[in-house]
Image (cartoon, rainbow, N blue to C red):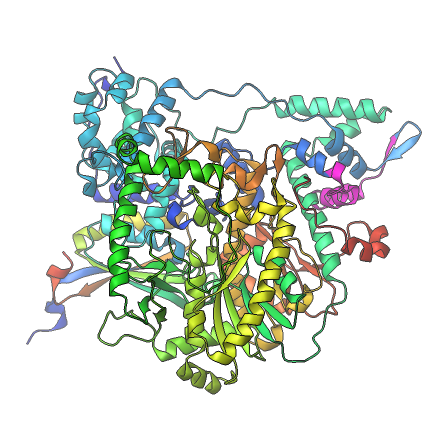
Amino acid sequence: MTTWTDLPAMAKIEVVVDGDDVPAVRDLFLDAGATGYTAVTGLSGFGHGGHHHGRLLFNDRASLSMLITVVPIDRAEGLIAGIRRLLEGRSGVFFVSEVHVSRPDYFA
Amino acid sequence: MSPATAGEPTSTVFSASDRARLVADVSHAGSIAAPYWPLTAFVAVNPLGGLTDLPFGDATSAARGWFGARTHLPLEAYRAEHARGTVTDADLDRAILRHDPSLAGRGPLDIGTVSMDPVELVRWDLLHGPVAAPLPARRSGTVAGALDEIMTGWCAAFVDEAHTPWQMPSRDQGFYRSWLAAAGADRRLAAVIGRDARARIATLPDDPAELLALVLRTRGVSDDQRIAAVRTWILRTPGWAGFARWCDQWAPEDRAGVRLRVLDLAAVRAAMDHLAPEQLDLTGADLEVATESAEALLDRRIDAAVTAVGGDQRSAIADILGSIDADDRAAIWLAAHEWNYRDRLLARLAGPIGSSDGARPDAQLVFCIDVRSEGFRRHLEALGAYETYGFAGFFGVPVRWRPLGSPVAQARCPVLVSPRHEVAEVAVDDDAAYLSTCSATAGLHDAFYAAKGGIASPFALAESAGWFAGPVAAARTLLPPRTSLDTSGAAKRPWWKPFGGAPRTAPVVDEVVGADLHAGLSVEERTLFAEAIVTTIGLAEFAPVVVLCGHGSETVNNPHASSLDCGACGGAPGGASARIAVAILNDAEVRAGLVERGIVIPDSTWFVAAEHDTTADLVTVLDRDSLPVAVSARVDALQRDLDVAGERNALDRAERLPGSATRVRDRGRDWAQVRPEWGLAGNASFIIGPRSMTASHDLEGRSFLHSYVAERDPDGVALETIMTAPLVVAQWISSQYYFSTVEPEIFGAGDKMLHNPVGGIGVVVGQSGDLAVGLPMQSVMLGEQRGHDPLRLLAVVQAPLDRIEGIILRNSGLRQLVEGEWIHVVARETDDDVWSFRTPSGGWEPWHLADDSMAEHRTTLAHTDLSTPLSI
């Protein structure tokens, strides 16, 4: 029986930034060879910067967004270095975790 | 031997991490360039938008270093305002004390037999002290200047879609690789670099990031210095840097055409610098216009003060003046100028407000918040039982609009919003013959203008079409067409579209089943948008006719034409947005849904679309043929008053425009006219509140007016929408006018007379050079006179202060603007409350007149003018 740990391991990188910074993160993803990403806009929650109330009616740029990508583990290091550098001058956080995927060729 | 050939490496070890860090640094570096939208959909932006994380004072200081630009008016200009009475001694004193509160605690200076207050001394210095003497301009190196010129040519060639006789190779590989493939054949480049240019270019890395890493390493630039180095390269051509920034940050992902990336732009300029015999200083931020030293100026200021006031207090005078440098003087003047406008406006708004008699109005008209609506609304209200409202001119429906027969859909909403829906215009009647004719004439139109805008093709065009174009040109010059009062209600169309056979059309707002997922809107979405329109405006009672009036501007021979259209519609005319919103609000299903949300629109109310041509001051009711008979009669009566209001507003505008007052409405059709209208020049405030606050006042076209009734927005959602979107966009507009006025050459587009279109996206001044960003000089100046007062935007809000405060605190971008003093905010909860001023450090202070002795003259002050900038 196949378990989830038998599936190929990859790195999932989730970046939460201001809407204005989404293009910069997107470019880093693509420049590092990511084959795709998912964007979740209008995040709400509470954190270092206080409350975030999610989507505004007529301003997609002012709320927080999360960009998620999955890359082979050997590509993750470079991408992480770039994101760390990018966030040195901007507000935002990112998370890296190991995930197991069913179709590794989608992400390579 | 040129410096770059002395055995230097032509490649470098470059790990994935190195590369990613460098790409991130380029992103940082590029953020200083304000995005530049193509002129087909002009969007006003703050030229210092990349610096709004800094307070205004720090950002302008940085801008002076990076751009070599002026960020305030010269002291002489502020002194002229003082002479005009638009800055008073009391304004200056208040600004001085706000700048340095410690001056209030200092004792007076004993000078001879009189004593002088320190504030008075500083005021004297501001009014009469010496100004910094400019030093001869530092000349940009000949080599650097020549390479900049070459660079702009390559940028134009890369982005040009149709006007160059040949296309650069490998454009799909990006600007750097495309340049690399072609640059070896560039004789101008070889003339600067040397005969071995081709061979040396061939040795450069193929990857732009690798090229940058190579050059940075060769030049010994450390990691913490490379953002400055990259900025130095891209700001050699700030206009093209702005366009690249737009491509990176704002361009629609499905946009046709090539993408000019900041990374590529930096790489090409770095490569040229790398190969050049003289190289740029990469330490950056040293372009501030050179003047005498701060010490020398201070000595002269002290000497002048000692001479003027006498006595023997040199050290005390030096102590006080030494705490205020040249930048502080400019900042104090600006603050005083702003306090003056604020006092006049608030004194006016503090007066008794108008009240409604409760009768149902004949019509309600919703205009765009644009400052040009204010005068028209005032004149219309005086003509009958009309209520007017202000709302962003896309009427809260962010969609892409596909006109009849067009293959292209264009966003009709503020650029802050990404439209998720597309609405198409379809024919109600048979449109086959019409579309066929359109297709043929549009092809002719496109071919003519492509040839006209090309590099070599105009010569052939003159030969082949001159027999036709020449006499037409002569006729248009000698007999410029006049604006006719054609109020037939036909939607405006380009001249190349046939008028006679145009079918009636309508927007398809219903969701199109089976078509593109985003075609049309579901009934739930339409109801949500309808609710947002009604609640944000604060509409509670409905007249029989409610007009949603967008605006546009019809001008000819004007590359900046879209700058006069509706900013809330993405730099397009607002008629389409009005038609879409009207279709939604007249929809029975939507009205039923609104009832469930507590909003009842009577069956007797009909929404009608219109468009205000701000150059001709004509309001045209759209889709007249589709109106119910009973509504049509009411609209006929309304149209007569709209025409009269237009005539009166045009007369007002004529006072500020040069030329014949009787031809003011024809200016848009005169192809020799460089100033068809003033646009938004003069804008200074953004007023959020009920119309009763402002209805009885002439605000001189200086105020954005957004309707808002706090009582109908208990949870503050509507106010948050207004303050995070229309107010932000207005701040961009305000900043663009501000910086285009104080620095027309760098932050403005220079002299319109010298503009030439380039690349299908913008203009250059003269035959070549950098993209000219911002507003043309003629949009903000009339000869040597200013047509705009450069002030930071004043937001005036009538709403509970804690509601406003909460919105400011939880929206970081808005908070930066307020606490960084990019905008000022004053507010009161109700008509009976005094105004309070939101301080940059948080909290609210009651507003009072700068000169308390003038308090008893408040009524008089309220009727003085609002410092209309032009004194012509």
In this view, the residue in front, B198 or B579, is B579
State the residue at coordinates (59%, 77%). B712
Q: Residue at x 75, y 57 (%)?
A: B347
**Depicted B558 relative to depicted B864: above or below:** above
In the rendered view, tell whether residue B805 sits above or below residue B673.
below
Residue B268 location, quadrant: top left
- The number of numbered discs placed on residues in the rendered structure image is 0
**Quarter the C terminus of chain B occupies:** top right
Locate residue B532 relative to residue B230 in the image: left or right. right
Query: B128 left or right of B359?
Result: right
Is residue B107 rendered magenta in the image? yes
Report the side of A92 relative to B383 (left or right). left
**Coordinates of residue B308 in the picture (x, y in percent):** 82, 25
Camera-side residue: B696 or B657?
Answer: B657
* Boundaries of the magenta span: B82-110
Rendered view: B28 above or below B187: below
Front residue of B14/B724: it is B724
Q: How far across and how far down the image is residue B443, in percent? A: 25, 49
Q: Judge from the rendering whether residue B456 lies leftward or rightward of residue B280; answer left or right.
A: left
Would you identify the image quadrant in which residue B863 lies?
bottom right
The residue furthest top is B1
Image coordinates for residue B399, horizontal then vertical, percent: 37, 65
Residue reaching furthest to the left: A1
Quadrant occupied by the N terminus of chain B: top left
Q: Nearer the viewer, residue B60 or B186?
A: B186
**Rendered location of residue B762, percent (x, y):** 38, 40
The prevailing secondary structure element of the residues shown in magenta is helix
Instruction: Judge whether residue B320 can be spotted in this image.
Output: no
Queried whether the magenta region covers residue A61, the answer comes back as: no
At 48% across and 52% down in the image, what residue appears?
B553
The answer to whether any part of residue B33 appears in the image is yes
